[in-house]
Image (cartoon, rainbow, N blue to C red):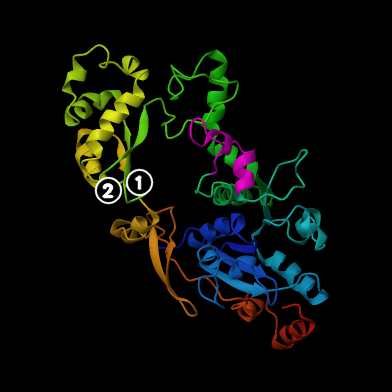
């Protein structure tokens, strides 16, 4: 069983989160990912948010599995030569530096193409071409400029960012799609191309239903939003609290133990098809004969009352009981799982979605494995590399340098 991307070599100039997310998926899919880091310093996240002194942080280890680490300074003459050779030997160069950083190293796209016409040059940027293209962007800025924050939060509250890293990791996954498409295109054309994913664009892509709603708003109120029928709509898509957004009313309700457990809640969707079963189970069979309740349209004006009644029932059950009772009745629902519960969930361990990894300096840690499962190309999760761990190995086996050349590069501080 071969790895899907076996034989593909990635020159990984990415750092922090958006780029490494993408190259880590490529590594899991079998590519040889050579991560280039600054000598003596490495990726900034190695030292960020450390929980154990003097070892690589979880921030770094959890984004850099299955990669090889090479230290290199491409600004020094010997480093420039090695970098040129790496461009010659790699299929993809991926980067997420500030705009123009690779150009300033002396390697604009035109030069990279000359060195290797087959290479794919993939970049994560904050914004696409336009007034903001030179601006630096981080996760929460991407969420705010891509439309997520304005449409997230309590109904009358201020904009909120989400804990899911839709700006960084979301863009990294988009970059993977672009790289794979460019690799496939190269099979036919023989030529590489430029792949660019802007974080604003990726967040907007993940928020496309809200752009849908913006256009629907011109034709009247959005009936599936909690603001209908009693509230008012402005001229932009409003925040909708925990409403489902899919046309089926849904909400988060308290479960047994909510007074002390911040995650003792469940999400329940009152789909028309299974409404009768839900009404019976919560003790409201009377709703089924009552024209005030027995059609989705009749219920729209009283969703808060309806969820209050559902909540009276869910507060007598713990969140997993709610799932176990409603699921067989085809009522869509799900418990609010805390990170602690997810970390301890046996089924996620069994599928390799959560993996325990052993690291020579920090010991055992948990990580998220490959979320993309291929039937003929299984992924294994290999610990993240120590800084410069594979420098000599890569210079010898990939570039064919001899001991003297490596020694000279080391003396110059290029590696």
Q: Residue at x 62, y 49 (%)?
A: 182
Residue 224, x across and y down, in percent: 43, 23
Mark 2 sits on what residue?
257
Q: Quadrant of residue 294?
A: top left
Report the Cα–Cα distance between label 2 and label 1. 13 Å
Q: Residue at x 68, y 78 (%)?
A: 400
Position above or below: 328 against 117: above
Q: Residue at x 29, y 15 (%)?
A: 295
Would you say residue 152 sits in the magenta stretch? yes
Position above or below: 85 against 142: below
From this viewpoint, is residue 192 visible?
Answer: yes
Q: Nearer the viewer, residue 242 or 45?
A: 242
Residue 407, x across and y down, in percent: 73, 87
Number of disc labels: 2
Q: Nearer the viewer, residue 20 or 116?
A: 20
Mark 1 sits on what residue?
336
Which type of secondary structure does the marked residue at label 2 adopt?
A: loop
Would you say residue 33 sits in the magenta stretch? no
Residue 384 relative to residue 101: left or right = left
């Amino acid at each position: 069983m071969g790895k899907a991307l076996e034989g593909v070599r990635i020159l990984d100039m990415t750092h922090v989160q958006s780029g490494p997310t993408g190259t880590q998926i490529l590594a899991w899919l079998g590519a040889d990912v050579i991560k280039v880091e600054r000598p003596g310093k490495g990726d900034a996240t190695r030292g960020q948010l450390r929980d154990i002194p003097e070892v690589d942080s979880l921030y770094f280890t959890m984004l850099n599995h299955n990669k090889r680490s090479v230290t290199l300074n491409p600004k020094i003459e010997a480093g420039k030569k090695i970098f040129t050779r790496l461009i010659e030997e790699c299929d993809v160069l991926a980067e997420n530096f500030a705009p123009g950083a690779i150009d300033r190293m002396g390697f604009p796209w035109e030069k990279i193409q000359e060195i290797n016409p087959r290479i794919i040059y993939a970049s994560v940027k904050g914004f696409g071409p336009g007034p903001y293209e030179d601006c630096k962007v981080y996760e929460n800025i991407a969420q705010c400029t891509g439309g997520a924050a304005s449409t997230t939060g309590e109904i009358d509250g201020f904009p909120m960012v989400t804990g899911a890293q839709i700006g960084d990791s979301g863009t990294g996954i988009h970059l993977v799609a672009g790289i794979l498409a460019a690799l496939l295109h190269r099979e036919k054309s023989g030529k590489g191309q430029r792949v660019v994913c802007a974080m604003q664009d990726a967040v907007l892509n993940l928020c496309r239903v809200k752009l849908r709603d913006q256009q629907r708003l011109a034709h009247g109120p959005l009936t599936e939003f909690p603001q209908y029928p009693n509230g008012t709509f402005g001229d932009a898509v409003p925040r909708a609290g925990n409403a489902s957004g899919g046309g089926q009313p849904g909400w988060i309700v308290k479960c047994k133990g909510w007074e002390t457990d911040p995650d003792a809640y469940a999400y329940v969707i009152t789909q028309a098809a299974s409404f009768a079963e839900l009404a019976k189970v919560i003790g409201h069979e009377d709703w089924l004969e009552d024209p005030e309740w027995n059609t989705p349209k009749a219920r729209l004006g009283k969703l808060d009352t309806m969820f209050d009644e559902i909540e009276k029932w869910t507060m007598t059950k713990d969140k997993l009981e709610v799932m176990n009772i409603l699921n067989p009745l085809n009522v869509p629902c799900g418990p609010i799982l805390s990170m602690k519960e997810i970390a301890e969930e046996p089924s996620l361990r069994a599928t390799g979605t959560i993996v325990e990894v052993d690291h020579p300096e920090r010991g055992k840690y948990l990580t998220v494995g490959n979320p993309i499962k291929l039937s003929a190309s299984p992924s294994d999760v290999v610990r993240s590399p120590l800084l410069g761990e594979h420098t000599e190995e890569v210079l010898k086996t990939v570039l064919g340098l001899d001991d003297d050349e490596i020694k000279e590069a080391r003396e110059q501080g290029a590696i």
